Amino acid sequence: MLPLTGNTAWAGKTNKVAAEMAAEEINASGAAGKYKIELAFADSQCEPGPAHDAAQKLITQDKAQLLIGEWCSSASVAAAQVARDNKIPLLVEISTADGIAKNGGPYTFQSIMQNRDIDQHEAKLLTEKFNFATVGMLVENNDFGLTFRKNMTEFLTKAGKKITIDVKQDRSDTNFYPVMTRIQSEKPDILVISLSAGQSANFVKALAESGITIPVVSDYPPPPYIFEKQVGQQAAKIGLVRGTFYLDNPNITPRQKEFIAKFEPRASQAVGEQHYATHWDIAAYDSVYLVADALKRGGPDPANFAKAMAASKLDGVLGHYEFDQNREVKPDGLPFVFIKDVEGGKLEVVK
């Protein structure tokens, strides 16, 4: 299940390429033991209704024995309900909302860090990389933004930081003037935001035009280079910092370099323009390997497969995968950094 149409189709299309590449390698190498991986795709659009229908279609029409997806958390929750009703294992490889696997039933697994783990990591990086006492916070008024607000407030308050601006904004509201006025009046040491990619672009443009020079750290990780096309030099003008699993860093592994070399030309051809690999692409690739590894050890019977997946200890391209008692990936194996926009449309890892 991938968003092959809609606002996040750019991601679904390249994730599809990554999954296909993984399946081809697995079938050629025998990584799934006596089993072969056959992929069937359904467009889940990053929305709950379409994701529910996509899961149903894959199970009833395509006779899928295992499901992987989705991209947006609300869509994954909807798909998990279908998987639970049909007793079909589901691996959630992109969605980061807390508790999808825990609440999704015994056949649902989550192989990406949850929001709480990501937010805690970001708060730690904030306190290590920046010197600040007061914080202005702007989040999108939805589950994703409000969860970030709750977690970040808890973590930063424990670190002795004071939240002086706390604003929730609807996705449809593109008027940032009231926020800018408060920033200019209260002058927090740093701004922390959690907005969708489109809202982030609008906010970055508004902030750059306002002349405000306060450091800005974005939680929602607009994809490297794709986001820069939306905002031009504005992100570099304000020195936007954002958290992500970024590949162009000093700690990149040989396996990640190998993946990039194989994947980027193929993905670029598929979308008709240069595409730089993102952690979402790698997560899609690794998810097929996780399924193959569990198939090899447990077979496709749902109960046996679930036991095998729960016992996974797999070194993937993105990091090391093991699951806890709630079938959620243990976060220690996945790298995470801050990147900053600099002049010339480039990105660099924050030292």
Image: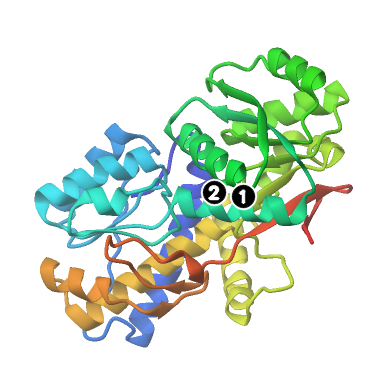
Q: Is mark 1 on a helix, strand or loop?
A: helix
Locate residue 346 relative to residue 100 in the image: left or right: right
Q: Which residue is drawn at 26% across and 72% down?
A: 309
| Residue drawn at point x = 54 percent, y = 55 percent | 270
| Image position of 117 with respect to 155: above or below | below
Quarter of the rendering occupied by the C terminus: bottom right
> Which of the colour schemes (rainbow, by chain, secondary structure, one colour) is used?
rainbow
Which residue, given by chain and number where applicable, does mark 1 sit on? 123
Instruction: Name the residue tied to disc 2.
Output: 119
Which is more toward the observer, 228 or 144?
A: 144
Which residue is drawn at the image coordinates 37% and 86% (left, top)?
29
The crowding category of the residue bearing disc 2, from other C-alpha atoms within 10 Å (few below 14, some 14 to 19, many at least 20), is: many
Q: Which residue is drawn at 23% across and 38% down?
A: 53
* Amino acid type, residue under disc 2 in the picture: Asp
Q: Indicate the quadrant where residue 110 lies.
A: bottom left
Query: Marks 2 and 1: in contact by CB < 8 Å?
Result: yes
